[in-house]
Image (tube, grey):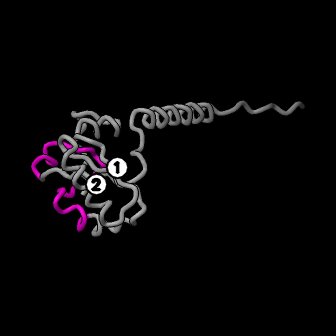
């Protein structure tokens, strides 16, 4: 009597297909939603401006409170900090304040549109997920 070879169960081929589809989905999500650039993103506009839309992972610290706010976040002086506002002017003031206080890696991203573009988000996404 010749032993019969059991045929693989259809479940295993379905499992492989499910795994492949899951990997493709995760890859597509990673491409469409890249992780934020290294560092801490801070929106230095007013609360009303922030509430109207912001980079989804950005913290909110008004520019006049930037030093106290960054200290409250517990950021190291050499940690990358990226600031933005409506046009870039208040972000420039915030950057200057942080540099004068000894923070060494502070970048002015410019205005909200520049920040959204750099973050890979659009205005329709802005504000969907709040930072602090």
Residue sitting at 57 percent across and 36 percent down?
15
Q: Is residue 112 left or right of residue 76?
A: left
| Nearer-the-camera pick, 78 or 61 | 78
- The residue segment tinted magenta is 47-69
Q: Circle 2 sits on which residue?
A: 95
Residue sitting at 35 percent across and 36 percent down?
120
Quadrant for residue 110, please give it: top left
Q: CA distance from mark 2 to mark 1?
A: 7 Å
Query: Do the CB atoms of the residues marked 2 and 1 lie less than 8 Å apart?
Result: yes
- Compared with 127, 2 (above or below) is above
Q: Residue furthest left?
A: 48
Q: Is residue 80 left or right of residue 3?
A: left
**Number of marks in picture:** 2
Q: Circle 1 sits on which residue?
A: 107
Q: Is residue 104 left or right of residue 61?
A: right
Percent from the top left, x then y, of residue 56?
Answer: 28, 46
Percent from the top left, x then y, of residue 119?
Answer: 34, 40
Quadrant for residue 66, please give it: bottom left
| Nearer-the-camera pick, 59 or 105 | 105
Percent from the top left, x then y, of residue 81?
Answer: 35, 55
């Amino acid at each position: 009597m010749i032993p019969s070879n059991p045929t693989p169960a259809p479940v295993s081929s379905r499992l492989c297909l499910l795994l492949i589809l899951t990997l493709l989905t995760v890859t597509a999500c990673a491409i469409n939603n890249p992780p934020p650039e290294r560092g801490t993103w801070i929106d230095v506009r007013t609360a009303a401006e922030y509430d109207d839309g912001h980079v989804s992972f950005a913290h909110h610290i008004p520019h006049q409170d930037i030093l106290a706010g960054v200290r409250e976040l517990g950021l190291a002086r050499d940690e990358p900090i990226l600031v933005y506002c409506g046009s870039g002017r208040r972000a420039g003031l915030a950057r200057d304040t942080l540099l004068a206080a000894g923070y060494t890696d502070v970048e002015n991203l410019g205005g909200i549109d520049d920040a959204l573009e750099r973050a890979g988000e659009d205005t329709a996404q802005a504000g969907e997920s709040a930072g602090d």
